Image: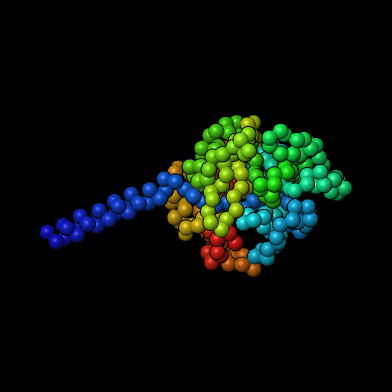
Amino acid sequence: MRGFTRSICTAAAVVLGAAGLAGAQAKANLPYDHIHVNEPGEEGSQWWETHFGGTRITEAPNRIMYGSTRLMFLSPRSQGGSEGSVIEQLGFSVPDIEAKIRELQAANTKVIEPIKDVPGLYKTAVVEDPWGIRIQIVQDPAKLGLHHVQLRAPDPEAVYAWMLDKFGGERTKIKGQIDAVETANVPGYSTVYIIVAKGDSVPSQGRAIDHIGWRSIAPVDQTKAMLESKHVELTSQPRPLNLPNGPSINFFYVAGPDGARIELVERPGLPPGK
């Protein structure tokens, strides 16, 4: 009888543990972590630092922080610009868009869309950096710096639902006009808007914006299990990486909507937002 009771208690603990894990998985809440671009390291990072500021970090070469989000430069192996890719453009908010466009034009930056003032929203323009990344510049005083990442997909609503289910965040309308998901509001981390434009696209891997990443704030194997419980396809298994000048990380990749390459990274030993 004692063995039977112990078995019952063990089974109950397993059931309760599984229920607790399922409950924790029901609503993900992962902060945003990084953007990885296929641009020449030193030259690319210097261009971005010159024109969009940020804080250079030393954990590995050619990385710039915007809030708690890393912009990381892979190498000059792009198979094409970001236009038409599922990860199509980055958005930066500046205090004076006219001055910024004059500065970029003086540096021979290609202007795709000139400045326009959208009533009730903000002033906006689109440029392209020397390696093919489309950048939407906006003048939104409420959110200066890295403002948004814009995806492109045939069914934006399906992408929004996928992002919210897998990573959390909040569905919103920017100034009541532009549909977006704001990444999870986790203490210590800055948030970013994810905007999805309607249209056909190609996968991001190898393009100018190769992939985007979320932070695993739990041990990486727990985040893997959570995502697998939500039927996310892993395209690599978790593995460690030793950074040249920083603590080692653990990371893996998943298949995002419409070919968006997405990385999950755990940064053990770093405080939130670092």
Q: Residue at x 56, y 47 (%)?
A: 183
Q: Residue furthest left?
A: 1
Q: Quadrant of the N terminus?
A: bottom left
Give the percent coordinates (x, y) of residue 263. Answer: 57, 51
User: Quadrant location of residue 11?
Assistant: bottom left
Q: Residue at x 57, y 55 (%)?
A: 189
Is residue 241 toward the left or the right of residue 110 in the image? Answer: left
> Which is nearer the eye, 122 or 213?
122
Task: Give the colouring mode of the picture.
Answer: rainbow
Q: Residue at x 44, y 55 (%)?
A: 222
User: Quadrant location of residue 26?
Assistant: top left
> Which is nearer the eye, 3 or 53?
53
Q: Residue furthest right?
A: 106
Give the percent coordinates (x, y) of residue 116. Answer: 77, 35
Counting labels gives 0
User: Would residue 98 be visible to someone looking at this image?
Assistant: yes
Q: Quadrant of the C terminus?
A: bottom right
Give the percent coordinates (x, y) of residue 58. Answer: 68, 65
Give the percent coordinates (x, y) of residue 164. Answer: 51, 42
Is residue 184 toward the left or the right of residue 6 in the image? Answer: right
User: Would residue 82 be visible to someone looking at this image?
Assistant: no
Is residue 52 toward the left or the right of residue 225 in the image? Answer: right
Q: Residue at x 40, y 50 (%)?
A: 24
> Which is nearer the eye, 205 or 154?
154
